[in-house]
Image (cartoon, grey):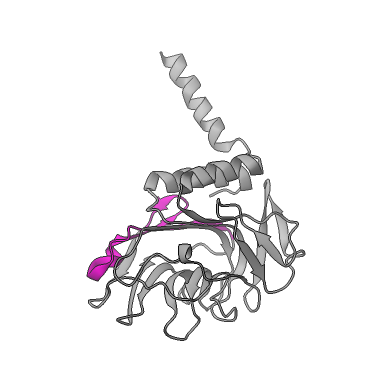
Amino acid sequence: MAGGMQRLLKLGRRDDTEPLARAAFLARMSGLLGANQRLLYVPNGTDTTTSVESSTVGRTITWDATIAARASALGNGYGQSFNGTTQYGSMPDADDMSFGNGSVDQPVGVLVLANVTDTAASRDFLTKWDGPVAAAREWNFSVNGSDQFRFEVYDEVTDALVTNVSTATIPQGSWCLFGATYDGRGGTTAANGITLYVNGAAVSSTATNHASYTAMSNTTVGAAIGARNVGTVAPMAGSLALVALTQKALTASEHAQMRSLCRRFFGVAI
């Protein structure tokens, strides 16, 4: 019995470190994101001005300019650099990227593998949020100017912001897996339904609710990677290797499994 247990433990360790090919990584990530996946972007090192992401949706991301020189090998994948000023990707408005209808919210799961540069500014990972102007704000996954990461949702009808922000500052200058799950509860305790994750484990965070919050609206703003939709607001500084989004309340176990997959595909010590 002891020998059998040792063999199982060895197999478990090998499975957590054995490299994954791109096709296997994408298939397993897709399985965890589930049937309502919305985005699975993993740089492939060959794209120029557009990319087709790898979820079952297969939406097109349009870049501000060619990204041919911005990809560098990362394990069996690539990391894509962002200069913190002008580089971002945009996607047109689509109903399936909205997670509220003004009355009720839906669950959201988001995941980003990033190497964030230490700058005294907000840096957006993935957003559906119209820069600094009103009437087109839905959700935002980003790092604030105090180096804490956050997930925010906005009720445009009542002008109410709900946010959950990490208590500790984030690791910067090294690869880190950031995740968030929103259970879609909506209402005056919506922020209590947001859980933040670093490298597959839930972290301490501060939830800020709003007494007027009901739900997000389905606005006409497009989604963006590495900035808000206008491209020059809260630009990402550093590199991204994975951006994933799903209409699903990802569990703690699923976040941990995604960490293992990233370790095996990208070869990062997270």
Q: Quadrant of residue 226?
A: bottom right
Does 180 lie within the magenta span? yes
Q: Residue at x 44, y 75 (%)?
A: 219
Image position, residue 206 (x, y; %): 32, 67
Q: Quadrant of residue 155?
A: bottom left
Instruction: Specify the farthest residue to the bottom.
Output: 133
Does 243 lie within the magenta span? no
23 relative position to 244: left or right: right
Front residue of 71 and 95: 95
Front residue of 187 and 93: 93
Image position, residue 76 (x, y; %): 68, 46
- Count of numbered circles on the image: 0
Image position, residue 247 (x, y; %): 42, 56
Q: Residue at x 67, y 65 (%)?
A: 81
Front residue of 118 and 239: 239
8 relative position to 77: left or right: left
Q: Quadrant of the N terminus?
A: top left
Q: Residue at x 65, y 44 (%)?
A: 22
Q: Residue at x 51, y 62 (%)?
A: 171
146 relative position to 225: left or right: left
Q: Quadrant of residue 242?
A: bottom right
Image position, residue 133 (x, y; %): 46, 86
Tell me where the magenta segment starts and ends, as one range: 174-203
